[in-house]
Amino acid sequence: STRKESSAASDVYKRQALARLEKPLTNSTSDSNKNTDLTPEASPLTLPPAHGTQTYQPLWDFNLGVAWARASFQKDAPDYGRIDSVLDQLLALPAPTVPASTIEDVYLLRVRERSETQASSINEILLAGIERLGIDSPNLQLQRTAKLIADGTVENAKTAVQEFDQTLQARRARLVGMTGTRLDAMTKSTEEARLDQFVWMKNVMRASIASREGLLDSARQILRNALRSQVTVPTQQRLQATLLLGDIYRRMGAWDLAATSYEEALSLIHISEPTRPR
């Protein structure tokens, strides 16, 4: 009986959490002049305060908001204004007990599917998340660095890579320090694997920068070492590195090696494509 009562109470509080997210949205107007600034600080905090209960947890608001936003992005015509409003409200909440990874997810959703004209605002949002979360923002730093390599200056991209590298070193030091001793073997192994992936991606970004600078031999060596390593990375990441290596070989006039890299890329494309029923 006690367990059923506890479960029922939890359901009530979860519904209340969702209501707190939806309430300000139902009262919003369709004013065509509403603020469309993408920075987290642009949207005022309109969520009512959490109920003073012993069982309420702010994490519920975050989990529900993130799940709702992800589902909204799957629609044919996502309501970006409404999505932004919910995510901005979450980011404005004081959340000392919410895991950094969950907060990072909100920032990542906040810059998802944005147009190129919003590049400066995207950078501001990513920077805000990085400043807030510090070394617990590796995915934000990874995305910002990738954008700078693609669209920013070489110097800014280099700086971002260096800062990302410092974050990875700090996380590695934390893992082998007191924090690491409190982790079980599985959790520690998972974090080590994630760090290895981040380092692999950082090295590929270094190769991209070297390629932009015309340092083709340096870029080639970095990519060859990365592709020969035993680090497990998503197929899409390995595909991009292989294509970049092929492009570097082509620019160097090493046509046979370029052709080999492109053939390897084709095999990776077949691996990444889902099997279609006949």
Image: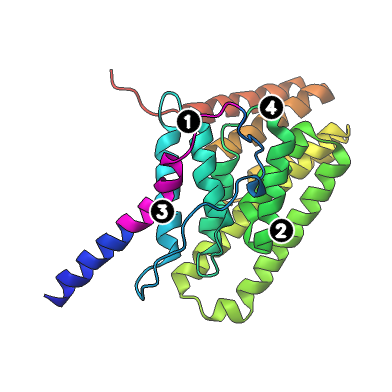
Label 2 Cα neighbours within 10 Å, binned few <14 / some 14-19 / many ≥20:
few
Give me the residue at 52% from left, 27% from top.
269
* Secondary element at tag 2: helix
Where does label 3 land, which residue?
Answer: 20
The residue located at (52%, 51%) in the rendering is 46
Q: Nearer the viewer, residue 146 or 260?
A: 146
Q: Which residue is mark 2?
A: 131
Residue shown at the point (57%, 76%) measured from the top left: 180
Labels in figure, total: 4
How far is mark 4 from mark 3, CA to CA? 32 Å
Few, some or many residues within 10 Å of mark 1 (<14, 14–19, 20+):
few
| Quadrant in the rendering for residue 60 | bottom left
Q: Quadrant of the N terminus?
A: bottom left
Viewer-nearest of labels 3 and 1? 3
User: Closer to the camera: disc 4 or disc 1?
Assistant: 1
Tell me which amino acid carries mark 2. Glu
Predominant SS along the magenta part: helix
| Element carrying mark 1 | loop
- Residue 133, numbered circle: none
Q: Tags 2 and 1 in contact by the CB under 8 Å rule?
A: no
